[in-house]
Image (cartoon, rainbow, N blue to C red):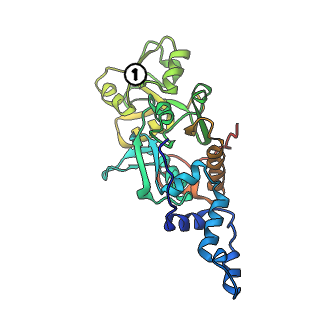
């Protein structure tokens, strides 16, 4: 991971003190004000520094990110509702909003977030190589991935489903995929599930899900299969596409981070639970994916 040591910017500390939960040593500035013999150790500014240090352990990834005032987050750039690059070139969606909320709780402004496109095939490598600090990218938690990285969350549970042309009613569920050509993304959980559990299906892998749409329209493939929320976004934007049947897997979405960084994983899990309680998770959902999908109950985080 990149070196993030440096002086703590006053504004970053101030923002962190205001947003951190628990309040820290909120009464210390008042005592300094009333003590006519007070020293600089009791000044409001230094009291704020102490409170921030109490929230973020010295030397932790969280403290380093906060001190730097910047964070690099990997996300998808091609998935409506969760991670899609908007007209201004900045990604938008539910995953993006979760990233913004975490950055805010570190005292990092939105312009301090560097968004990096991650696809299914490179997410673990980007984390391992330090190219990103976090990956929030419709990232299913599974045991194979946990051998290389760690996960916080889950913060949402999706399920694999099927997308076809609206006028193709031959495919209504996974039992209808035998003998069909199904597009998905190389290195994804849906690809692995199709290969393992649907051997009579011809799996056609691409690099990104939006690359499956034109082959679907021109008849190169019969269906697209990935998580229902991703497919719902495509269907919402394209009248000629339709999601078929109910989800047939459970896909808990987690936040990927460097393996062994237990402090960071615990901190993110704490923040997610606070988001559930204070309504910011619901607000993030309803401002993005909630335009198409009903608001679900947030899943319990897995503190493995």
Q: Position of residue 180 (x, y in %)?
A: 42, 16
Residue at 64 percent of width and 71 percent of height? 47
Q: Nearer the viewer, residue 17 or 181?
A: 17
Residue at 70 percent of width and 69 percent of height? 25
Q: Position of residue 92 (x, y in %)?
A: 41, 50
- Asked whether residue 285 is in view, the answer is no
Q: Position of residue 250 (x, y in %)?
A: 60, 32
Question: Is residue 179 found left or right of 295 in the rendered image?
Answer: left
Question: Is residue 28 found left or right of 15 in the rendered image?
Answer: right
In which quadrant will I find the C terminus?
top right
Quadrant of the image occupied by residue 216: top left
Q: Which residue is mark 1?
A: 205
Q: Nearer the viewer, residue 225 or 135?
A: 135
- Asked whether residue 178 is in view, the answer is yes
Residue at 48 percent of width and 27 percent of height? 188
Secondary structure, mark 1, is strand
Q: Is 192 located above or below residue 80 in the figure? A: above
Q: Nearer the viewer, residue 121 or 17?
A: 17
Q: Nearer the viewer, residue 230 or 96?
A: 96
Which residue ends up furthest to the left in the rendered image? 218
Residue at 59 percent of width and 73 percent of height? 45
Q: Is 33 located above or below residue 205 in the figure? A: below
- The local crowd at label 1, few if under 14, some if 14 to 19, many if 20 or more residues have their Cα within 10 Å, is some
Q: Position of residue 163 (x, y in %)?
A: 43, 30
Count of all numbered marks drawn on residues in the image: 1
Question: Is residue 3 found left or right of 44 in the rendered image?
Answer: left
């Amino acid at each position: 991971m990149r070196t993030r040591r440096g002086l703590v910017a006053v504004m970053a500390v101030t923002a962190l003190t205001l947003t951190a939960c628990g309040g820290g040593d909120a009464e210390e500035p008042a005592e300094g004000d009333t003590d006519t013999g007070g020293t600089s150790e009791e000044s409001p500014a230094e009291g704020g520094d102490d409170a921030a240090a109490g929230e973020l352990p010295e030397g932790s990834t969280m403290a380093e990110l906060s001190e730097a005032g910047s964070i690099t987050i990997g996300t998808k750039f091609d998935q409506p509702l969760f991670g899609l690059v908007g007209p201004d070139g900045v990604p938008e969606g539910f995953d993006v909003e979760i990233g913004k909320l975490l950055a805010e709780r570190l005292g990092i402004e939105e312009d301090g977030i560097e968004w990096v496109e991650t696809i299914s095939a490179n997410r673990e490598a980007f984390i391992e190589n330090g190219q990103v600090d976090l990956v929030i990218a419709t990232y299913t938690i599974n045991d194979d991935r946990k051998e290389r990285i760690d996960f916080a969350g889950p913060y949402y549970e999706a399920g694999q489903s099927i997308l076809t042309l609206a006028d193709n009613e031959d495919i209504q569920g996974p039992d209808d995929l035998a003998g069909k050509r199904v597009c998905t993304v190389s290195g994804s959980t849906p690809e692995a599930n199709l290969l393992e559990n649907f051997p009579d299906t011809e799996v056609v892998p691409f690099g990104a899900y939006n690359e499956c749409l034109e082959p679907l329209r021109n008849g190169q493939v019969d269906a697209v299969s990935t998580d229902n929320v991703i497919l719902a976004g495509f269907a919402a934007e394209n009248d000629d596409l339709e999601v078929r049947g109910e989800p047939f897997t459970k896909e808990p979405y987690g936040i990927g981070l460097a393996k062994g960084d237990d402090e960071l994983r615990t901190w993110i899990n704490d923040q997610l639970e606070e988001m559930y309680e204070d309504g910011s998770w619901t607000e993030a959902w309803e401002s993005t994916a909630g335009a198409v999908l009903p608001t679900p109950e947030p899943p319990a985080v897995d503190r493995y």
